[in-house]
Amino acid sequence: MNTFNQAVAAHPPAPTHHERLDTSARDFVDHAIAVQESANTMSAVEYLKSHDVAPHVIERVLLEPERRRTAQEA
């Protein structure tokens, strides 16, 4: 491993605001979207709240589907 690769491995770059920090949140959001489609939005909201998903994320993923991340951004 060269010096540059060692430096990157020791200090990986900070994630951008588009990168998911908590991969478990992806699973909660995916499940909530399925709940929203099969039941209703309030059930999906309550599910996400019970898993401590941030309110701004809940609003974005449930009320603004065009702003959801794509699989490539995950």
Image (cartoon, rainbow, N blue to C red):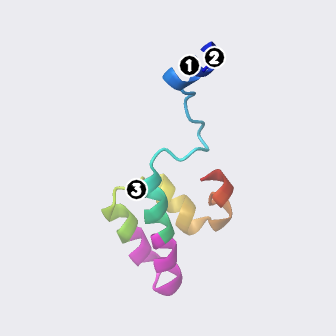
Residue beneath the point at 41% across and 69% down: 45
Which circle marks residue 6 in the picture?
1
> Residue 31: x percent and y percent?
46, 72
Name above or below for residue 12 compared with residue 16.
above
- Looking at the rendered structure, the number of numbered marks drawn on it comes to 3
Q: Secondary structure at mark 2?
A: loop
Q: Are marks 1 and 2 in contact (CB under 8 Å)?
A: yes
Within-10-Å neighbours for mark 1: few <14, some 14–19, many 20+: few
- Mark nearer the viewer, 2 or 3: 2
Magenta part of the protein: which range? 31-45
Residue placed under numbered mark 3 in the picture: 53
Name above or below for residue 61 compared with residue 8.
below
Front in this rendered view, residue 59 or 5: 5
Q: Secondary structure at mark 3?
A: loop
Residue placed under numbered mark 2 in the picture: 2
- The alpha-carbon separation of the residues under discs 2 and 3 comes to 40 Å
Residue 42: within the magenta? yes
Tell me the kind of residue under disc 3: Val
**47 on left or right of 1:** left
Q: Are marks 2 and 3 in contact (CB under 8 Å)?
A: no
Mark positioned earlier in the residue sequence (2 or 3): 2
Residue beneath the point at 60% across and 21% down: 1
